Image (tube, rainbow, N blue to C red):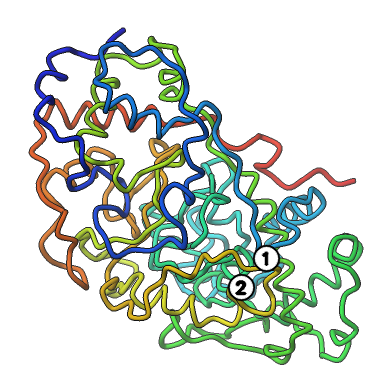
Amino acid sequence: MSVLPALLLALQGCSGEPEATGDTGDTGGTGGTGGTDATDATGGTGGAPETSHPDLPEDVLTRLQALSPATLPEAPPDASNAYADRADAAALGQRMFFDPGFSGPLLDDDNDGAPETLGSQGEAGRVSCAGCHMGEADFLDQRSTKRQISLASGWTRRRTPSLLDMGHAGILTWDGRRDTAYNQAMGVIESPLEFNSSRLFVAQRVAKEYKDDYEAVFGPLPAALDDYEELAPEDAGCSEMPEDPLTERCPKDGHDDPDVIRVVVNVGKALGAYQRQLDCGQSRFDDWMHGDLDALNEQEQAGAVLFVQKGCDGCHSGAYMSDQKFYNLGVARLDSMFILPYEDPGAGPGLAGAKDDILNSRGEFSDGYDGRLDDIPEDTADLTGAFRTPGLRCIGRRPTFMHAGQLRSLEDVVLFFNRGGDNGGYLGTKDQRMVPLEMTQEEREQLVAFLRTLDGPGADSALLEPPAAD
């Protein structure tokens, strides 16, 4: 089945250069950084497949081939984590990912024991990574009310991102605050809104529950752990919600002890090894690009042409459809009944914090440095209100969109980009390339239909739950 010739004739006047963008998250401009250029960050093209699409203009075909290599590339090496590709580290990380025992007490009174929560206020040991990154939901949060922000110990301020294809990113999180998997895990552990725990508590749980498996991967646990009084789960983190839970922490003894930090860093490295295995996989779009001309219907094929003709691949580039950079799209703030209005500064302070963090990929706890921080500018003020470009594979199954779930459907997302973003309600300056796309309703429907063809099978079923006990 071929693309509608009428659409191609209508698009012949397009230059083929990126215009605004056609994203479902963060795209649309310059000034961002991902530590690498777009090709490196997304795994390159991997060799364009030989396909026969006689109805596609040559420039359209070339750009679509760049999104669908003959074989989806594996995650690049992670220089910061010497254990990233070890099976024993990944198996340990998988156990830890599903273990709520690393967390302290739930603080927010919205934790009332209802199915949308992880327990009742004051209960400890209820939050695991899988509590918000649900394996059966592409490692997204399908549990919390409205599926915009997540309720763990408290309400987060951003949408839980999918972990599928995470191994292809050099800079992590919506604002780029974390540049390693172990650094990202440390932030979750210590946040009173997430695990509400502490470094010492996590290290002590490793010694108590994971000693043999940990030492088989990372070597002996430090004897210094015996010097600290054992923390009870109820005392693992904060006893009440801090006035500013986004910045305040409740550190315990051993917070600055390199031996304690090393154990928790290794927990993060094991988690990273597990998460690198989580992929969306090949989609119907790939089947179509690789020669199955019936894999997409006419509407979906027309949407694929629009995707490149409207410049969506300017930021959603490469095999995983993200340049891993940061842009201010003009996304209005999240107004939620659960939290006070929050003006999210995004990558401005986020990337600056990543550069200065002693736990980053240049620090003493990293196993090597690959330059992922080098492109961050000295002054990140221009990135205020900017957020990371998400990959688009498996986009059709996400419950909400943008960094705080402000948009509820793919149709809403396409409408947002079609109008050139919004004109207020956010910090910073909207990127100048966010201009109206002037798509008709039919074209918007075609683009949505194409985006839904990017869904793959998701992670292997064996990775969706804790590993079977030996």
Quadrant housing residue 347: bottom left
- The residue under label 2 is 186
458 to 89, vertically: above or below: above
Of residues 94 and 336, the one drawn nearer to the viewer in this rendering: 94
Instruction: List the single residue furthest toward the top.
Output: 1
Task: State yes or no: discs 2 and 1 in contact (Cβ < 8 Å).
Answer: yes
Horizontal side, residue 20 vs residue 361: left or right:
left
Q: Position of residue 213 (x, y in %)?
A: 87, 60
Name the residue located 67 percent from the left edge and 81 percent from the top edge. 236
Three-letter amino acid code at the position of disc 1: Gly
204 to 29, vertically: above or below: below
Q: Give the SS element for disc 2.
A: helix
Quadrant housing residue 385: bottom left
Of residues 43 and 224, the one drawn nearer to the viewer in this rendering: 43
Query: Label 2: few (<14), some or many (≥20) within 10 Å?
Result: many
Q: CA distance from mark 2 to mark 1?
A: 7 Å
Of residues 233 and 312, the one drawn nearer to the viewer in this rendering: 312
Q: Give the SS element for disc 1.
A: helix
Three-letter amino acid code at the position of disc 2: Met
Q: Position of residue 101 (x, y in %)?
A: 71, 66
Quadrant housing residue 281: top right
Horizontal side, residue 24 vs residue 138: left or right:
left
200 to 445, vertically: above or below: below
Name the residue located 45 percent from the left edge and 81 percent from the top edge. 245
- The residue under label 1 is 268
Name the residue located 58 percent from the left edge and 65 percent from the top edge. 180
Q: Position of residue 21 (x, y in %)?
A: 22, 46
Query: Label 1: few (<14), some or many (≥20) within 10 Å?
Result: many
Q: Which mark is residue 391?
A: none
On-image quarter of the N terminus: top left
